[in-house]
Image: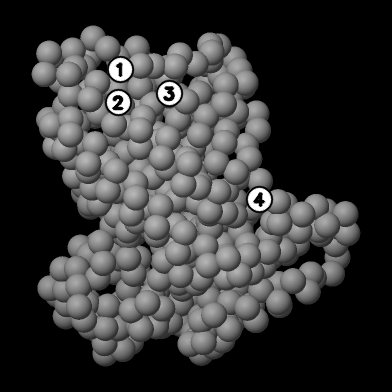
């Protein structure tokens, strides 16, 4: 297998050491920890990024065919049109003692796209947007309990699921999340259910329907909803009086120009958007029906940072470009190419893999007890070929056919190398650092 050795990442490794001394856990986002990819090899820090390309602190250039800003940079890094809108915003002032009109323009646009909705509130991140939605649901219903499916952030309302058992959230994206610091009196306030397992949520509603403030879920993530599944959940919410909340932070703007729920003709009471809605700039949208949204006035939800101008301005620029260029079609197309390419390369190399996820949010894993070591070696080999790569591929508009072609050619070689190493029991011998972490792990 031919490898193109990158330059030294000395500066990047030194920055990681400095970070661990000053920042608990080393990073602000668990999913961006270098230890989650290839410890001691993943550069971790960037000096600049444009399109699908990223330069690290040692001026090594990579093609990002991995997490693409954890799905936030849906148009690509430093998109010209979005950044131009941001620059104009900065020139005219990003905040003042008055409110920006763009927040009304964005509200009109979001309600035009989602004609079931009437009103919005804003935040500047997905997690806090979800916390606001849950607060509104509880204020609206006067009830406390939340039934949920999927991953919804770090706030107390969600992490309380692990107060009674450390394993309640293990099936919801991130295993091993500790609820230290979450008040013990929140035990039993949130109840998990499995996606596409209608009996789970049906039982929750039967047992707790009179206490249920909301049913919170992602309408789609790794698999399509079974026929009638979302419709039946909508009916359960209606019957119990619970607010139906669709978390579109990850799924939104991947399969269409709006919420993925529009494809299934099931409308929630509230829908939450962040990440892709503003191409990496900080923005969160809580979108909903008037009679539910008005309950925000019965509680206290307010923040100075939610009034700055960059969020709405960049969201408007992102959504308009997304609609104009039919970005979702491109994301679906290249996502399918990547999924097929992984499968073909694995078959040729006699490797067993499992491919999952909607095409714009693709995942693969090795069907092997040594999956984590093999994935770390995969990332290591791909770095040596000039790619940021992992078991995840989040599609962007900036990733073009030539990126996909060169990436899959590299995957073909790398899978062959891993297959040979596995056959000769050399996986650990070839690793140049520790095996990647899985889920949450405390860093020393």
Q: Earlier in the sequence, mark 4 or mark 3?
A: 4
Callout 4 secondary element? loop
The residue where tag 3 is placed is: 385
Q: Are marks 3 and 2 in contact (CB under 8 Å)?
A: yes
The residue at 36%/30% (across/down) is: 410
Callout 1 secondary element? loop
- Whether residue 152 is visible to the viewer of this picture, yes or no, is no
Q: Earlier in the sequence, mark 2 or mark 4?
A: 4
| Closer to us: 396 or 429 | 396
Question: Does 368 sit above or below residue 419?
Answer: below
The residue where tag 4 is placed is: 79
- Whether residue 421 is visible to the viewer of this picture, yes or no, is yes
Q: Are marks 2 and 4 in contact (CB under 8 Å)?
A: no
CA distance separating discs 2 and 4:
31 Å
| Closer to us: 43 or 344 | 344
Mark 4 vs mark 3, foreground winner is 3
Quarter placement of the C terminus = top left
Q: Earlier in the sequence, mark 3 or mark 2?
A: 3
CA distance separating discs 1 and 2:
7 Å
Q: Are marks 1 and 2 in contact (CB under 8 Å)?
A: yes
CA distance separating discs 1 and 4:
35 Å
The residue where tag 1 is placed is: 1
The residue where tag 2 is placed is: 414
Callout 3 secondary element? loop
């Amino acid at each position: 297998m031919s490898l193109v050795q990158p330059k030294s990442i000395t500066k990047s490794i030194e920055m990681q050491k400095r970070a661990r001394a000053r920042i608990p856990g080393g990073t602000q986002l668990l999913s961006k920890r270098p230890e989650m990819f290839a410890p001691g090899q993943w550069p971790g820090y960037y000096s600049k990024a444009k399109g699908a390309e990223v330069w690290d602190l040692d001026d090594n250039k990579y093609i990002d065919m991995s997490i693409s800003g954890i799905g936030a940079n849906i148009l690509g890094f430093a998109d010209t049109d979005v950044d131009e809108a941001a620059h104009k915003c900065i020139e005219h002032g990003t905040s003042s003692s008055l409110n920006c009109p763009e927040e009304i323009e964005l509200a009109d646009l979001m309600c035009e796209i989602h004609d079931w909705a009437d009103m919005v509130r804003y935040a500047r991140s997905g997690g806090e947007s979800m916390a606001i939605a849950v607060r509104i649901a509880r204020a609206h219903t006067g009830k406390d309990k939340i039934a949920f499916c999927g991953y919804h952030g770090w706030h107390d309302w969600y992490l309380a699921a692990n107060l009674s058992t450390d394993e309640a959230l293990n099936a919801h994206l991130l295993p091993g999340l500790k609820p230290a610091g979450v008040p013990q009196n929140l035990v039993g306030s949130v109840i998990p259910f499995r996606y596409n397992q209608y009996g789970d949520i049906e039982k929750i509603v039967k047992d707790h329907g009179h206490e249920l403030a909301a049913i919170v879920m992602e309408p789609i993530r790794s698999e399509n909803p079974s026929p009638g599944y979302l419709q039946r959940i909508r009916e359960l919410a209606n019957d119990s009086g619970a607010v139906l909340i669709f978390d579109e932070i990850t799924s939104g703007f991947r399969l269409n120009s709006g919420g993925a729920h529009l494809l299934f003709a099931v409308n929630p009471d509230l829908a939450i958007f962040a990440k892709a809605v503003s191409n990496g700039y900080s923005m969160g949208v809580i979108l909903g029906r008037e009679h539910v949204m008005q309950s925000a006035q019965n509680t206290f939800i307010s923040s100075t940072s939610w009034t700055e101008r960059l969020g709405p301005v960049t969201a408007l620029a992102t959504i308009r470009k997304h609609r104009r260029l039919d970005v979702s079609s491109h994301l679906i197309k290249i996502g399918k190419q990547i999924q097929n390419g992984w499968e073909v390369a694995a078959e040729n190399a006699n490797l067993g893999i499992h491919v999952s996820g909607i095409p714009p949010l693709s995942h693969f894993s090795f069907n092997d007890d040594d999956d984590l070591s093999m994935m770390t070696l995969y990332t290591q080999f791909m770095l040596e070929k000039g790619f940021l790569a992992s078991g995840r591929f989040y599609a962007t508009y900036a990733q073009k056919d030539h990126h996909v072609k060169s990436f899959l050619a590299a995957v073909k070689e790398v899978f062959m190398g891993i297959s040979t190493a596995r056959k000769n029991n050399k996986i650990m011998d070839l690793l140049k650092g520790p095996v990647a972490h899985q889920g949450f792990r405390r860093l020393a």
